[in-house]
Image (cartoon, helix red, strand yellow):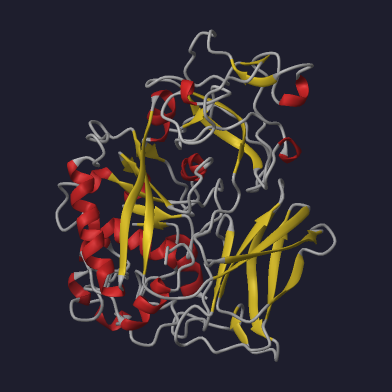
Amino acid sequence: MRSLLLVLCLSLACSGAKPPTLDAGPPGVDCPPGVALAGECQRDADCASGVCVADSAAPLEDGAPVPLLCAPASAAGDGLCSQPSDCARGVCLVSGSCAGPCVDDADCDGGDVCRHAWALRSSEVAQDLGACVPRVLLPTGVSAERLPRAALLSSSAPRVTLPLAAGPSLSVFLPSCGAEVSAHRLALMDGTELFGPSAGDADHPPINPIAALGRPLTLLVPSGSDAPAAPDGYALELDATGEGSVEQITLRGVPGPGSLALQLFYVGVPGWAPVGDAPPPEVQAALAELLSILSAASITAYVAGQHVIPGQLATRLAVLDETPDGHSPEREELFALSAGLRQPALPVFFVRAMDRGALGASGGIPGPQGVMASTGSGVVVAASIIGEERLSLGAVLTHEVGHFLGLFHTSEINGSGVEALGDTPVCDPLHDADGDGVLAAGECSGFGSENLMFWSGRGRGTELTADQATILRGAVLLER
C-alpha cells in the first residue's frame, strides 16, 4: 500500500517546539473553546441583565483571553468589521466579522456553533475567546444534507460502517471532541472495493482514492473518470480512535464553470499587508498566475477579503512546525482562524515559512469545502518560496487550491500513483535516472512534471488535463 501511505504524507503538506497559548483539549475537530474566564461572564446566560460584551476599558494584553463583562448592547452593527467598535459586543474576529461570546453550541443561534476564535483588540493585539460562528457556508445552488450523528464506540467496536448515497457528492465527517476517524474501506454495495486494504498498491492505485487521515475527513465520490458509477450508493468503513460520535455533512451541487471567492490572511510575513483594497504586489502576481492556470478549467477567482494577523499570534504561526509524519498542530490552528467568515470562500494563509521544506499545504483532498471553523478550512503557502530557483508562488498556490478542490498528485515522489483520472501523465520509477528513489522534475520532463499537480513544486508545472478540469468544475465551493 505504498501509494496510500504516500498520499497520507503528501496530501496535506507539499514538499524548537512552540507552546500554544490555549489548551484546546482532546483531539477532534468539534471541541468546545476551553478558554479561561477573563471577566464577569463568558456568555449571555451569565448576565442577570444585559449581554456579555468585550470590556473596552481593560488593558490590552496580547495573547490573553478577551476580558468580558455584562452590559447593555450598543447600537453598533453585527456584520463585517475591522475594529472592535464596529461590533455591538466589541468582538471583531481576525476573520473580519462580529461575533458573540459563548461556552458551547447551546449559546449560539441560527445554526452557528461555539468554537475557539481570535479577536482583534487593536492593530497589534489579538485575544482569544469562545465565539459563535457559522458552521456551513455554501454558494447558491449547493445543498447540504446533515445526517444524524453515528456512534463511535472504539473500545468495543473500533470500526463503523456508514452508507453513502450515490454521487457525485462531497462528504465531510466531523468527529466529536475526543474522537478521531480515518477511512478504512470504500466499496460499492455489491462489495467491489474502491479504496481499502486490497484496492491498490504502489503499481495499482485505488479506484477512488481518499486522503484517509484528513482532519476533518473528506470524501469525494466519484473522484475521477476511472471511478465507476454507483447507482445504489456506497458503503464506507471508518476506523475510530477515542469514544464519541461523528457527524456527516454531504454536499451536492451542479458542476460547471464558476468563480472562487478567496479570503486572504497574512501571518507574520514582513511587509505583507493590503495596499488599499489591493493585495501586496507579491500576492497580486501570484493571483494573476492562479487566474491564468484556472482559466483552462473555466474557473475564475476574486479576493473577497484580506486580514492581517497581529501580535504574538502572528509571531507564533509565521513558521509552521511539522512532525515527520506530516502532522502539524500549528497548521490546524492556523486554518481554524477562518472561524467567523460569513461568506462561502476559500481561506488562503500566507506564512513566512514551513518546516521540513514544505512549500504549501491544503486542509484536505478535497478540503472541507463550505465547512468553516475547522482544522482543515483552508490552504497555506510559504512566502519563503519567493526568490527560490525554479519555484513560483503562484504555481504553488494554485497547486494547493487544486488539492482543496479535489485533485491528487498525478504521481508521487517515488512514482506510485494515487489518482483515478485516465488522462493525466505518470512518471513511473523507470525514470529515476540516478536511482535515489526520488523522481525529480528533470527526470520527469515530458512525463508529468509540466502538470500543475506533479508532486514537486520545483517542476513549476501549470498544465491541466481535461479530466482534472472536470474535477475542478465540480467543486461545491464555486459560485455559479
Viewer-proximal residue, 261 or 195?
261
Question: In the displayed structure, would residue 274 be above or below residue 406?
Answer: above
Q: Taking 331 as reference, is 123 left or right?
A: left
Viewer-proximal residue, 31 or 45?
45
Q: Quadrant of residue 427?
A: bottom left
Q: Residue at x 37, y 82 (%)?
A: 467
> In x, y percent, where is residue 34?
67, 31
Question: In the displayed structure, would residue 35 be above or below residue 287?
Answer: above
Q: Taking 238 as reference, is 369 left or right?
A: left
Question: In the displayed structure, would residue 446 be above or below residue 88?
Answer: below
Report if residue 87 is visible in the image.
yes
Report if residue 19 is visible in the image.
no
> In x, y percent, where is residue 141?
52, 67
Q: Taking 415 as reference, is 331 left or right?
A: right
Q: Quadrant of the C terminus?
A: bottom left
Q: Residue at x 41, y 35 (%)?
A: 317
Spot the residue most to the front. 75
